[in-house]
Image: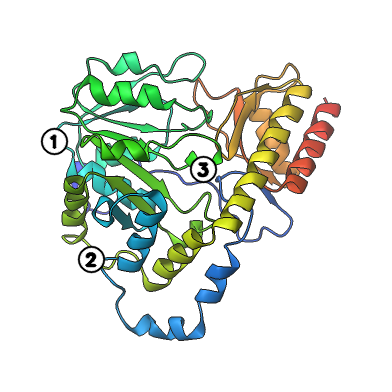
Amino acid sequence: MSRFFSTKFDDLEPYVPGEQPGNIDNVLKLNTNENPFPPSKNVINALSEDEICRLLLYPDPYCTKLNETLAKELKVDFNNVYTGNGSDEVLAFCFYAFSDKGFAFPDLTYGFYSVFASLFNAETTIVPLRDDFSINIQDYDNITKNIIISNPNSPAGLFLPLDEIKKLIEKNKDRLIIIDEAYIDFGAETAVPLTKIYDNLLIIRTFSKSRSLAGGRLGAAIGNESLIRDLNTIKFSFNPYNVNRLTQIAGTEAIKDKEYFEYTRSEIIKAREYTKYEMKKLGFSVFDSMANFVFAGRHDKISGKEYFEKLRKKNVIVRYFNTPREKDYIRISIATIKEMQKFIDITMEILQEK
């Protein structure tokens, strides 16, 4: 750090993103839960030369067309929707706006939660997952802090049913419940309808996973109008033009192309179920993921770390978390069925070499 860096950040440990190799032509990249399919052709066609030429103008700070389209898709009012520069920025604004009470979240979950809590000096309570990596909502009964839960949660991809979410919300209506639904479109049930009932519920969404716009950086929040006003207060005090012109267009068109969305979503779900089945056949312990990734490991012949390293030598990149509870597993992003078949073939080669 330089001698000018604020000492209040001395203990800040930045988030470490998944590896992004410069050349992926010969790499099977299964480490960052990206969508293996390109954006909708409607998105590609809409990003025309005329629109690119309009980059000389600032974008609409209110994201009007995008938010109208999203609100219609989710069956909520325009004033119940907020969009930002990726769900990471939306989450950061949440940690900034609602930090007075502090936050509680699982010990194994999206790594940015702890970073944001530290960055914005929010008190935290870390709640261990069960031994089977599931969330026990009763562990949150006596917590008065705001609660944030990724649902489905990473790394195992397990889903907390809607009735459990309701119990969490109703247990203490003086705390805010934030449900991060980054992976909700891959088979789980959304809690968005509950935002019409409860004013202490905020849903976070991303366009990176099921909408193939990871490089476009677009995220959203859905909740009570007062919560959305809070986020806009932070946004307009920080960067009114946080969603660029082309991303607003891309997001709008991605929402409108429902047929393509359903196609890619169903293909990823089929590839996920294939991968879970084949990994179990090979002797791996596999969690029943409802996300676009699979968490697998605890094999008799190979450790999680060795498996990760041998895959890397064969130009397959997966995610490995070297923590006491995760070290026996790897997290595998789901690609096309053809790519997952290749992954299984390579895994079989590795096991045969043992």
Q: Is residue 230 left or right of residue 281?
A: left
Closer to the camera in the image, 211 or 105: 211
User: What residue sits 31% from the left and 47% below the top?
Assistant: 222
* Camera sees residue 109: yes
Amino acid type indicated by mark 1 = Asp
Q: Which residue is mark 1?
A: 100
**Mark 2 crowdedness (10 Å alpha carbons): few <14, some 14-19, many ≥20:** some
**Mark 3 crowdedness (10 Å alpha carbons): few <14, some 14-19, many ≥20:** many
Closer to the camera in the image, 112 or 54: 54
Q: Which residue is mark 3?
A: 185
User: What residue sits 20% from the left and 35% below the top?
Assistant: 122
Q: Answer with mark 3 or mark 2, whichever residue precedes in sequence.
A: 3
| Secondary structure beneath label 2 | loop
**How many angstroms separate mark 1 from mark 2 (CA)?**
24 Å
User: Measured from the top left, where is residue 344 in percent x and y?
Assistant: 78, 36
Amino acid type indicated by mark 2 = Pro
Q: Answer with mark 1 or mark 2, whichever residue precedes in sequence.
A: 1
User: What residue sits 46% from the left and 86% below the top?
Assistant: 50
**How many angstroms separate mark 3 from mark 2 (CA)?**
29 Å
Q: Is residue 332 left or right of residue 313?
A: left
**How many angstroms separate mark 1 from mark 3 (CA)?**
32 Å
CB atoms of marks 1 and 2 within 8 Å: no
Q: Quadrant of residue 248?
A: bottom left
Q: Quadrant of residue 53?
A: bottom left
User: Measured from the top left, where is residue 319 in percent x and y?
Assistant: 58, 38
